[in-house]
Image (cartoon, coloured by chain):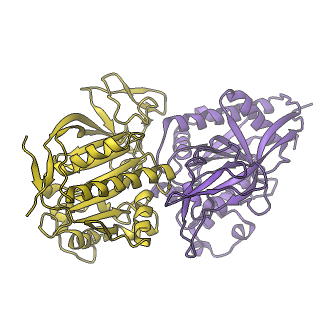
Chain colours: A yellow, B purple
Amino acid sequence: MESVSFPPLSSIAICGGTHGNEMTGVYLVREMQKHKVDKIGSVSISTVLSNPRAVDVCRRYTETDLNRCFTDALLSSAITDSTPYEVRRAQELNAQLGPKGSEKAVDMLIDLHNTTANMGLCLIFYNADYLPLQIFKYIQNKMLSVPVRAMQLDIPLSDAYSLDSLGKHSFSIEVGPQPNGVLRADIFNIVKEAVDHTIAWLQEFNSGSTFKAGEVEAFTVVKSVDYPRDPVTGEISAAIHPQLQDNDFKLLKPGDPIFLSFTGETVKHEGEELYPLFVNECAYYEKKIAFHLAQKRTFKLPSIHMKKD
Amino acid sequence: DTSCHPERVAIFGGTHGNEMSGVTLVNLWMKNSDEIQRKGVEAKPFITNPKAVEKCTRYVDTDLNRAFTPENLSAPGGDELPYEVQRAQEINKVFGPKGSPEAYDVIFDLHNTTSNMGCTLILESSKDHFNLQMMNYIKKAIAPASCLVLLNEHPLLKYSTSRSVAKHPVGLEVGPQPQGVLRSNIFEAMRVILKHALDFIELFNEGMEFPSCSVEVFRVSERIDYPRDANGNIIAMVHPNLQDCDWEPLNPGDPMFQTFDGKTIHYQGSGTVYPTFINEAAYYEKQQAFVTTRRETLVASAIGKA
């Protein structure tokens, strides 16, 4: 493959508190703001506390999930008195860091998240953007004491719903397990290191380095599985089975246990072999997701370098 | 009180609406109570904070598990009172009145924590020989699995719990589990503890004697807050060496907190303590990073029909 060039990446945004109770991003952004971090070498940095109202009350959101408000439709919807706070906030963020899809948007947006699932360090991005894929490969080679993986969402930009879709080349950093409302030092240190490596990569990129071609594996979600529920009340009637709990990214085969009901029955996985992700994520109970199932795919990466004028 | 004949037992779930083991177990038993029935024992499952359970939040206006103070229980104001104070008064009417002969004999209050506490039984009085004997029975029944006893009799740090309405209040605290999450292993562990607790009550009612025994407890000593700046914001996190090390000895000089730029703050106490409730989500707002305890052996008097 020929080397692919991109314009310099000179403006980035680091966002935390998109979900107000995911503490690592909240505190990392606050620290950067305390130290007035706005430029590192060739990269100018905006640090943003995405959902300050939710951060104040330490909840995921106040009226609706901010990280689902960035579809083209919601970004252009009319604001009325009854518009939820997060939809308004999304439009504010779009004006500040976007507009989504335009030349004015930040070159890169990194959104920091935590999960209650045992996902280790996971980069999440849309489609097969070479830039986050190269950064993923770079981080994976630098951070050897923690599992580093990538999750890819196959969604056209217009339907892309998350904050990071505002930037030209963006990704989320999702680290777990960490309970909502809890700040763990080990998780904080991991996220800080990943952000530091990303900024280092950007410096190298902007100074003209070429990043070699290669291959990376990433996981693409193909479907989601809900909890077994009581047909009348809708309440869940089983918990994630102990053999699946904490085993994100471990291949699930037909016949493997997935749920253990409160009356002792085991529910088994049926269908093709797939990789479970976001197993027992707190925020997904209300979205009717017990876990996602993904395929593992290999992505061929060209070498990339900065386009010189 | 060796003459008590515990017939009225309650099992409280949802005192904190996002602690899912208790919510799930109590809902299960309200639908079908076979599992919790014992001869001579009327075991009543009860959701103490239904509004908080519905919103999957710890509390709506104020922490129900701090609300059972004498002031709150006698406060006038009806509908104008905070939701949980109204709830406390209702619960006190049904299961109390606190301190009176009509109060329930035993209340089990089911809780989860984000701390790595394993199975913990919480005792409010070192002189409650019935509870001490029950806890001894439970510990032996689940061995080699561990179930530790936390004694909170501290004059300042003790608080007015939902279960304190009963003559013999028993707290069950199982972790680690994130708020709003139901983990199968945590759920089943709590279920097993309750099974043994109810077995104990049944045996006692049938006339079994329980000879005097020693019970190791961890007595609450001191609350340690996060280092904070002038505005009250935390400036350091529980150190990775202390995180998840509930019940392990913390010695003077051991790492305790880590600042955001990586510096270590060490424990400066005068002796070895046993920290617990390390990094509990709900305690950031209560100014508590962890609580220190000291190990003690209590002697439980013999109980049972002579």
Q: Along the horizontal axis of the image, is B29 left or right of B159? A: left
Q: Quadrant of the C terminus of chain B?
A: top right
Residue A22 visible to the viewer: no
Where A303 sits versus B77, above or below? above
Residue furthest bottom as drawn: A81
Q: Point out the image quarter for the N terminus of chain B.
A: top right
In the rendering, at what x and y percent does residue B51 appear? 50, 59
Which is nearer the eye, A50 or A200?
A: A200
Kindly give the residue lying farthest to the top in the view shown.
Answer: A255
* Residue B60 left/right relative to A61: right
- B92 or A64, nearer to the observer: A64
Q: Would residue B299 be found to the left or right of residue A24 on screen?
A: right
Q: Is residue B227 left or right of residue A79?
A: right
The answer to whether one can see residue A296 in this image is yes
Q: Residue at x 7, y 64 (%)?
A: A309
* Quadrant in the rendering for residue B189: top right
Outermost residue toward the right in this view: B306
Q: Is residue A173 above or below residue A251?
A: below
Q: Measured from the top left, where is residue A77 in percent x and y? A: 17, 70
Q: Position of residue A190 (x, y in %)?
A: 42, 50
Give the residue at x 25% y 64%.
A12
Q: Quadrant of residue B159?
A: bottom right
Out of A261 and A129, give the one closest to the viewer. A129
| Residue A276: percent from left, percent from top | 32, 35
Report the residue at 61% width, 61% height from top.
B64
* Above or below B275: residue B155: below
